[in-house]
Image (spheres, rainbow, N blue to C red):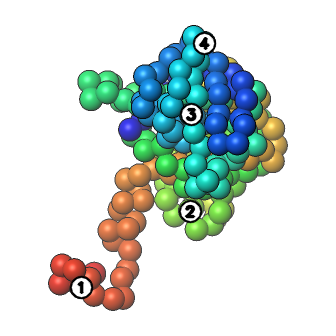
């Protein structure tokens, strides 16, 4: 589990085949889970100035792989004793979003992101969402997009300051919204395993 607070911006040394090599101040233990642009990956090797992770074909298919260059967000997995200052994340990317608007507004930045319509039902006004692993609060939701307000501290200390219009980003919707939808969505067939009708 993660909480969407970025530890640092790590530098990508290379992405060769399925191996992503990073340069970072943070050095995990081999086998540790670590979120890279929001996707939960496993450290398979460490070096004096960073570590390597392996990207499976499934992960490569789910993420905006073109962003795994230059700089990436990294966040180590939480410990049970950690404070949750963002919101709970699994590091499972639901879909890829597209940045449609990015503008300065008084002391903050307004960002509008479009996502596939089948995932908009998991995006709730004033609810939580993760963009490339950054925990954020949703302001407005429309049929296929939503609006975020990024405070200057977050903007300056994440990749948001580099994002371009039409750039793709990794999206993890709020897991509680997903669970609630799954639990209460209308079912038309009986659940044979537990013998009840949903």
Location of residue 178 with respect to 1 vertically, above or below: below
Q: CA distance from mark 3 to mark 1?
A: 41 Å
* Mark 2 lies on residue: 119
Residues tagged 3 and 2 counted as in contact (Cβ below 8 A): no
* Mark 3 lies on residue: 53
Q: CA distance from mark 2 to mark 1?
A: 28 Å
* Mark 4 lies on residue: 49
Please tell me which residue lies in front, 148 or 191.
191
Residues tagged 4 and 1 counted as in contact (Cβ below 8 A): no
Q: Is residue 7 left or right of residue 189?
A: right
Residue furthest to the right in view is: 165
Please tell me which residue lies in front, 36 or 14.
14
Q: Which mark is residue 192?
A: 1
The residue that appears at 69% across and 47% down in the rendered structure is 64
Q: CA distance from mark 4 to mark 3?
A: 14 Å
Please tell me which residue lies in front, 43 or 9.
43
The residue that appears at 76% across and 43% down in the rendered structure is 66
The residue that appears at 64% across and 36% down in the rendered structure is 19
Q: Nearer the viewer, mark 4 or mark 2?
A: 4
Residue furthest to the bottom in view is: 189
Instruction: Return the disc, 2 or 1, that comes first in the chain's sequence.
Output: 2
Corner quadrant of residue 133: top right
Instruction: Return the disc, 4 or 2, that comes first in the chain's sequence.
Output: 4
Quadrant for the N terminus in the image: top left
């Amino acid at each position: 589990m993660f909480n969407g607070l970025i530890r640092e911006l790590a530098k990508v040394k290379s992405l060769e085949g399925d191996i992503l090599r990073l340069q970072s101040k943070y050095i995990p233990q081999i086998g540790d889970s670590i979120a890279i642009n929001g996707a939960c990956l496993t450290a398979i090797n460490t070096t004096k100035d960073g570590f390597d992770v392996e990207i499976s074909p499934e992960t490569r298919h789910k993420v905006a792989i073109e962003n795994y260059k230059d700089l990436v967000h990294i966040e180590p997995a939480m410990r049970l004793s950690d404070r949750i200052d963002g919101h709970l994340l699994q590091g499972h990317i639901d879909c890829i979003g597209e940045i449609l608007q990015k503008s300065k507004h008084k002391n903050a930045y307004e960002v509008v992101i479009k996502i596939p319509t089948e995932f908009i039902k998991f995006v709730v006004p004033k609810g939580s969402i993760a963009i490339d692993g950054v925990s954020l609060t949703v302001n407005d939701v429309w049929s296929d997009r939503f609006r975020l307000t990024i405070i200057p501290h977050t903007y300056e200390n994440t990749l948001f300051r580099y994002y371009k219009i039409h750039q793709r980003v990794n999206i993890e919707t709020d897991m509680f919204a997903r669970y609630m939808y799954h639990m209460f969505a209308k079912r038309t067939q009986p659940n044979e395993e537990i013998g009840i009708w949903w």
